[in-house]
Image: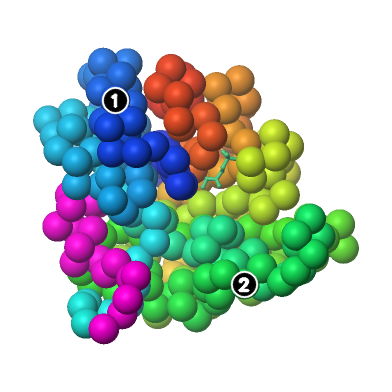
Amino acid sequence: MSRKPFIAGNWKMNKTIDEGIALVNELKPLVAGIDNVDIAVCPTFVALAKVGDAIKGSNITIGGQNTFWKESGAWTSQVSPKFLVDAGCKWVIIGHSETRGRFGTVDDELGKVLDYFGEKDVTVNMKAKFAFENGLIPIIACGEMLAEREAGKTDEVIAAQMKTDLAGFTKDQAMKMVIAYEPVWAIGTGKTCDSDEADRVCGLIRGIVKEMYGADVADAVRIQYGGSMNEKNAAELLGKPNIDGGLVGGAALVAEKFATIIKSAK
Ligand code: 13P
């Protein structure tokens, strides 16, 4: 089965409302008419609604960068799927390494434990299920840290994440879910994962999906690569059989670069 490529820009904590609108206004003509790639941008929560207005009528969609598993109530700072849908979102990123608090491990540079958000696989799974129930498609991120890779534990780490993150979806949900393989050491570092290795890990993920949901789901599910993907390396990564798209950080903040990546996928 041929899977439709999906390129999403994760803006992280970048772009004010006006800057976000300007960015999508620049992007729109560059990608106009491309209908064989799904295109999304994921602005900050506060910019979502206005950027959502700016992309109306175009082939660009929007997504949130996180969500919560309760609909509403006394959950200070949280943003449930209902609010994301209200702002026009189709997608939501869940379990990004930056919201997983880098797994609560010691950051040498800061000399302290980084567990700001404390996301765990169980909460990733709860958020993904609740997102589905409320009309959003989750982009579920996974990835190993450098120390885990160097210790030869990549496959085991990814398998453990995926088995919990992806548990208990209906078959229909599993068909629609998007998975992003983002090796943590490649994020924002300029050290892209070798394309064959990224393809191998994406293939491993597809194998886990097959074990959990069957061959038809494994064949349909889209797996993105993320981690220093840019306008120069995108074509090679996106040319690999198991890589169906990209979750792009830094390069998604520049319209021309993001458009080049989108065009390399088509
Ligand atoms: P960079 O493309 O800046 O490495 O970020 C990748 C990422 O984390 C996307 O979610």
Across and down, in percent, residue 218 comes to: 46, 58
Residue 78 drawn in magenta: yes
Residue 38: which quarter of the image? top left
Which residues are the magenta region?
A: 74-90
Which quarter of the frame holds ligand 1?
top right
Q: Residues within 10 Å of mark 1 (few under 14, many from 20)?
A: some
Q: Amino acid at mark 1?
A: Ala
Across and down, in percent, residue 63 comes to: 31, 49
Which comes sooner in the sequence, label 2 or label 1?
1
**Residue to which mark 1 is pinned:** 22
Q: Which mark is residue 115?
A: 2
Residue at the outermost bottom position: 74
Q: Which mark is residue 212?
A: none
**Quadrant of the snapshot with the C terminus:** top left
Say what secondary structure mark 1 lies in.
Answer: helix
Residue at the outermost right position: 151
